[in-house]
Amino acid sequence: MSNEFDAGEPWPASPGVRHVRARTPADLARVPDVSGMVVFWNGERPIGHRLKAELGGRSLELEDMAPELLDAPDLPPAPGAPSASVVICTRDRPEELARCLASLPRQSRPPREIIVVDNASRDGRTREAALAAGVTYVREDRPGLDIARNAGARAATCDIVAYTDDDVVLHPRWLERLVAAFDAPEVMAVTGLVLPAELASEAQLQFETFWSFGQGYRRKDFDAALFSSYTRVPFPAWDVGAGASMAFRRALFAAIGLFDERLDVGRAGCSGDSEFWYRALAAGHTCRYEPSAVAFHYHRREMDGLKSQIFHYMRGHAAALLVQNERTRLRSNLKQALYVMPRWLAARAWRRLHGGAKPRDRFLDQEIAGYLSGLWFYLRQPRARDGTP
């Protein structure tokens, strides 16, 4: 019997990504024949991947494995858990929204409510897609992803508020596993594993190789003690997960405020999610990464779209460091923003100028421009008051 899963349920048809069963250590030796990714599964639990990419005239092979999970039992049904709202923030992508919404009725633990926040779409197609799916529709006319996230948080009525993106398809056990991870009162935020839905273009391979959302296949807890151990550099909050798959106890918003509306798409560029995790950790709460909660993300296919994405990632990262400094007064953020990061970018530019460019440096111009733009953006914005947006 072949170890390869059939294309389709519960995984999207995936050019460039193959999903295979792994029963023995020998199964984990599989490498893609051409550029792409092999994802290994033990039952319904992902346990590793291998990625092969031809980029910039170089062949790269990367892997991330948790071989000890070969012997782990398959995931049992999660016990009773708190009620959950799912929030999807979207703008002018009705086809992608409809695809994402179609994966929610198949959840092993359906959400009590699904909220689509239409973030200033230019026509009525987003509303039509939401109403056709029978979900709650909220219109937010102020552009900005964190503005939309806050609108979703205000509209949600359940104990847990889970967020995903319109360019995502959800594994049937995504919400079950995400919500079940709130198994201790100190866990206030949970993120899941985000795998590529496809690797059909060079831009998608470039993104997955150097900017992947994935944080591995082992559960990780990030608590106040770990956060406090970072004294010379800021805690790397982006390691907590990805905004395409995250959930919070609704009480957390009351405790530390909502998402900072200066960040993310439509404003600074991104990092509203990581700044929120950083703020939660600084307040003494625990964040958890739960890789058994799986979402599949459709990376941007075109190089122009990837260039814009990287520019805005770096713009948001720079702004987020200064926001973190403002909110927590931890000066390691200021050092990182004004010394460490500029020095790192300058060193890479110097290396490229002298013929030492690496495949990672392909969009270095966008990284530098985005970073400088983020610093300037922050300086022109009003400061937050009492943790509010």
Image (cartoon, helix red, strand yellow):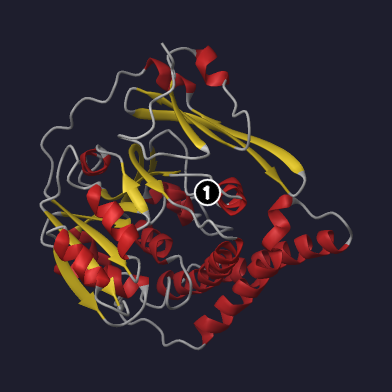
Amino acid at dot 1: Ser
**Measuring 26% from the left and 25% from the top, which residue is drawn there?**
75
Near mark 1 (Cα within 10 A), the count class, few <14, some 14-19 or many ≥20, is some
- Where is 139 relative to 246, above or below? below
- Indicate the position of residue 299 as horizontal and vertical percent values: 48, 53
The residue indicated by pointer 1 is: 212
Please identify the quarter of the rendering in which residue 353 is found. Answer: bottom right
Is residue 353 rendered to the left or right of residue 156? Answer: right
Above or below residue 330? Residue 83 is above
Q: Position of residue 76 (x, y in %)?
A: 21, 25
Whole-percent x and y of residue 22? 44, 18
Image position of 133 (left or right of 53):
left
On the question of residue 307 being in view, the answer is yes
Residue 247 visible at all: no
Q: Quadrant of the N terminus?
A: top left
Residue at horizontal 47%, vertical 44%? 198
The residue sitting at 64% across, 67% down in the picture is 367
